[in-house]
Image (spheres, rainbow, N blue to C red):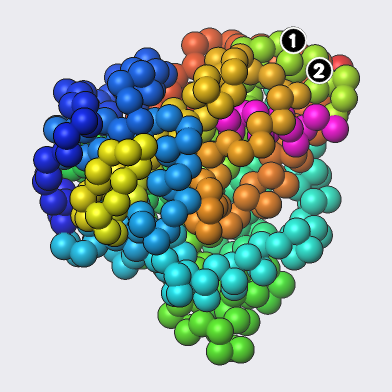
Amino acid sequence: MIEGHIAFKPADGIPVWDIDPYAEEVLLHPNEYYAELRARGPLVYIPKWSVLASGRYEETREIFSDHARFASSRGVGLNDFKYGKPWRPPSIILEVDPPDHTKTRKVMARALSPKAIAGLKEGFLQTAEAIIGRLIRQGSFEAVTELAEAFPVAVFPKAVGMVDSDRRRLVDYGAMVFNALGPDNKFRRAAMSQAPDIVPWITAACARERLTKDGLGALIYGAADDGEVTEEEAAMLVRSFLSAGVDTTVTGIGSALWCLASNPQEYQKLKTDASLARPCFEEVLRYTSPVHTFARTANQDTKVAGLRIAEGTKILCALASANLDPAKWGDPDIFRIDRKPVGHMAFGAGIHGCVGQNLARLELEAVLTVLADKVDRIEFDGEPEWRPNNAIHALDRMPLRFIGR
């Protein structure tokens, strides 16, 4: 199945569902799967991969937030690090729990605090203006490569202080890491085949000597100088910028464009009031959930919703399903940029909430603000196509047309 995954049988009362959540059609068009997952109960046993799955909001948030009962340190994919060696060293921020997590989270949170990144805003806006201005003049364009990828790759490596930049390796690295969280299917195998090329390049590009002294990476290495982390840990933290911070932002921008092109009345609201850029992005996250699934491992015998869960049980937390739960949102299938969806799960929850969310919000706010100012209409110029990934729900291509003001 996958290295370090232990099969188990569910407790009484947990329904069994013969479904493959990693099937290509499910990954491409998952909403029917999410609805059925929620309808079957708070927890469902999926025998194909010997996992529990949680798709309702309350139970998913409980499992995702309680690091004492449900560990990240045993892997956030299907493999259990207690029994099998992962393909790479575990992330020292995503795949650890307190007290180790507390140390590294403190360093990353300081480097990515609102104060630390405030100076990036003007550069982000200027880059967004340049790219969007060119696309208005161009007319029709492929939005994934020419905007969703182009903007983060233009601003993010520079913010980190990277001297080297390679769009394909930067974007594909994140896609590879997220695909690796799934089973040994064709998507994981195809992603892992890229590792011999991508991983050495990423490692070299994040080395201290390949970073400027005024970027976010330098702040992390400064923490090593102060004895807060080791030099090796600092290098791993800088690499985590790229594993979690590029592909997810690419996905967020693509999803935002898809939502606004699909809902022109909501885009009119944004044009009328550009201050809605931030709540618009939050609604995009809730509605499309760039990271659709992360796992937790029961670290003890416990219960959720009155159902017994044995130690060692792997649980798929379908974050995207939780974000579409009618019990939480009322009308989850409607995209409303003024919803202000406080509590959505797109950035996770609890101590493992996305540490880079301030930076992601700054990037998306820049793109949405410039769109509202410069673009009168966003129109599809062909059919959007989604890209199957074991943990990310991303567009593969989306022909668009910007009509300037």
The quarter of the image holding the C terminus is: top right
Measure the alpha-carbon separation of dots 1 and 2: 7 Å
Question: Is most of the magenta stretch helix, strand or loop?
Answer: helix
Q: Identify the disc placed on residue 269.
A: 2
Q: Quadrant of residue 85?
A: bottom left
354 to the left or right of 282: left
Q: Nearer the viewer, residue 130 or 396?
A: 396
The image shows residue 167, relative to residue 266, as above or below, that is: below
Q: Amino acid at mark 1?
A: Gln
Q: Residue at x 41, y 51 (%)?
A: 173
Q: How many marks?
A: 2
Membership of 276 in magenta stretch: yes
Q: Amino acid at mark 2?
A: Lys
- Percent position (x, y) of residue 187? 26, 37
Q: Residues within 10 Å of mark 1 (few under 14, many from 20)?
A: few
**Dots 1 and 2: beta carbons under 8 Å?**
yes
- For residue 234, say whether it is visible: yes
Q: Can you identify the residue that label 1 sits on?
A: 265
- Percent position (x, y) of residue 14? 22, 31
- Percent position (x, y) of residue 346? 54, 39
The image shows residue 129, relative to residue 210, as above or below, that is: above
Q: Residue at x 60, y 81 (%)?
A: 223
The quarter of the image holding the N terminus is: top left
334 to the left or right of 186: right
Q: Residue at x 38, y 23 (%)?
A: 38
- Percent position (x, y) of residue 35? 39, 18
- For residue 33, say whether it is visible: no
Residue range (magenta): 275-287
